[in-house]
Image (cartoon, rainbow, N blue to C red):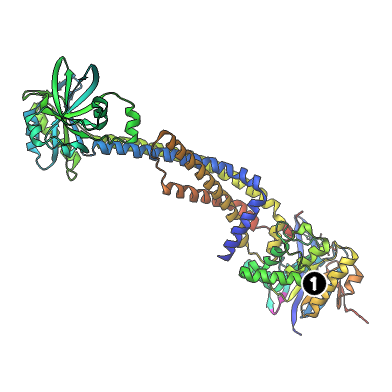
Amino acid sequence: MKDIIKINDLYKTYKNGNIEVKALRGINLTIKEGEFVAIMGQSGSGKSTLMNIIGCLDKPTSGNYELDGKTVVGLSEEMLSYTRNQKIGFVFQAFNLIPRNSALKNVELPMVYAKKPAEYRKERATKLLETVGLGERIDHLPNELSGGQKQRVAIARALANEPPIILADEPTGNLDTAASVEIMELFTKLNKEGRTVIIVTHEDDIAEFTNRIIRFRDGQIIYDGQVDHS
Amino acid sequence: MMLIIESLKLALTSIKMNKLRSFLTMLGMIIGISSVISIVSIGDTMRGVISKEYESFGKNRISIYIYNSDEGYSDVFSFEEIEKIQEAFPDDINYIGPSTGISGEIINKNQKNKCNINGLSPNYQNIQNFKIIYGRNLSENDINAGKKYVLLQNTSSSKLFGTEDGTGKIITVESNGTIEEYLVVGIYENTQSTFQKLFAGNSDTHTLYAPARAFSSEDSAFFNIDLNINDTTDKELFKSRVASLIGRMKNVEPQHVRVYAASDEMSTIDDMMSKLSLAVGAIAAISLIVGGIGIMNIMLVSVTERTREIGIRKALGARTSDILLQFLIESAIISAAGGIIGTILGAGTILLGGLLINIPVVIKPTVILTAVSFSALVGIFFGLYPAKKAASKDPIAALRYE
Ligand SMILES: Nc1ncnc2c1ncn2[C@@H]1O[C@H](COP(=O)(O)OP(=O)(O)OP(=O)(O)O)[C@@H](O)[C@H]1O
Ligand SMILES: [Mg+2]
């Protein structure tokens, strides 16, 4: 399998006035296509910072990052938007659905920015919502859905443009155990279908669903190993 | 293009979600545009009415008299002198005659009715086109011979004789103590505009027309000359040439020969109107700026409220320009909607007003088009800053916004 994410000697330093926060300190990481990875570590250890850089929402202070064989560092704003739209599917802890829009409209959104025609968008969004088990709820507004249902809408939305990578920062952080298990089963299924899935989690039993665990401490990787499912 | 359509839909839903707020935001625009539309349309209507008045008076009509304001001295013209003027400008003058007439009373059975008889000279058809419905016009012969024939208005005929067709009847007129009889040869139809009627009111004075020579003799003198020139004649040149001719003829300074054209008055009115338009423009500009600031204010609030939404959109692949466009279209739509409502309100008021006082109102489509597109432009202009603010938000910070 090819390397879909290749990170070399990556640093991220936040400067707030005189205070410098070294969020990432020399990260080297390679993730192959089709992997299912859990990133763990204490609060403030730099997990979200790394996810944002992988997702092209943030830029590293130094170091190199290659996504799907292309260097991301130095890309224009426009190209970064395009990359986010085409290569990345985001799932957030806070769901981040647009409250005024129905489930269907939310799932259509990445396709709007991909300039897909309206009929295609509607058809695909409906299909995706059916896949995540929300075929009956396509016209509901986010506040008419449970947490688990909202997260499933978010996952459907992440899949809209068929991106090779799904990035989920604490996707089960706001869910109870039953809903968490459902969401993790969904991710497992997506991974089995060939997508690269990277999640951030604090919980070991969530990380157990994945195949590889990366542990962070103070902006550095302190552990990187396969999960034994036997 | 597709994104524009999507942005339009988006803007419409967000306006629908916040109906009251959107309406209040539009209010400045509505008031501004509706007042501009009404004031401009009132101006255009007045202009239309007035220029029609002048057209009916005759845009090539000129009136001449002699008056020396320093010495309070004036002079008169004889038929002979009037003819000389005519002969001096055979190619330019359509009609020339003394401005004359008599006023008196028509004695009809035991009643007396006020009347004005206006005197006509040869070629009078060039300035006064009567619509004769019974009988005939005054002929060249009648005019030259000074026959005591009159043209009577159909409404006057009805009042005097109980029938519209009063041809062949005799009218007895008392004026300055003398009594004369006139034969009605033709009945003309009242073709006054609604505006004329409005201002003429229910005047009981009958207006009749007779040959000028019917009530003046060969040695009569007249203060005013009525004159009509050809369309092709250079009006200003003609005015100075006729003034100097009369100056020589009557031995007065040409500047004391007053040559007055209706078009002069029209250009004064045009001037006044354009000044009025300027004032209206200033009011419009102020109201649009106030409306625009209102829109900017609400858009800023909206951008802050929707910070998180902006972050989400960016994470999902929206470019800076997409966000910019979305908010610009939204403010343009709010503004243009305000403009449209304002236009409907303004035009409606004017149409209703016109209907009530029975004046044909003029609402130019260009005015409406300008108003609506200008309001959209105002929306874009004042939406630019909030939209830029929205578009430049950092996606991570925006996603974290509570
Ligand atoms: N915009 C920022 N400005 C300054 N410091 C920041 C900023 N974002 C993150 N940090 C700092 O960088 C460090 C890493 O933050 P990050 O959000 O990556 O941690 P995390 O591992 O995701 O933590 P958590 O498990 O609580 O989500 C923290 O010390 C944080 O305070
Ligand atoms: Mg985090």
Q: Nearer the viewer, residue A131 or A205?
A: A131
In the rendered structure, the answer to whether residue A89 lies left or right of residue A230 reads left
Q: Nearer the viewer, residue A41 or B381?
A: B381
As drawn, B300 above or below A43: above
Residue B244 location, x and y as percent? 12, 33
Quadrant in the picture for residue B312:
bottom right
Crowd class of label 1 (few under 14; some 14 to 19; many from 20; radius 10 Å): some
Taking the magenta stretch, the answer to whether it contains residue A67 is yes
Q: Nearer the viewer, residue A84 or A141?
A: A141
- Say which quadrant the C terminus of chain A sits in: bottom right
Chain letter belonging to callout 1: A
Residue A18 location, x and y as percent? 77, 55
Q: Residue at x 76, y 61 (%)?
A: A96
Q: Considering the numbered disc 1 on the image, is that residue within a helix, a strand or a loop?
A: strand
- The residue that disc 1 covers is A26
Residue type, numbered disc 1: Gly
- Quadrant location, ligand no. 2: bottom right
Q: For the view shown, which residue lies furthest in the front direction? A: B162
Q: Residue at x 81, y 64 (%)?
A: A149
Q: For the view shown, which residue lies furthest in the bottom direction? A: A1
Regarding residue A23, the answer to whether it shows in the image is no
Which residues lie in the magenta part? A65-69
Regarding residue A165, the answer to whether it shows in the image is yes
- Say which quadrant the N terminus of chain A sits in: bottom right
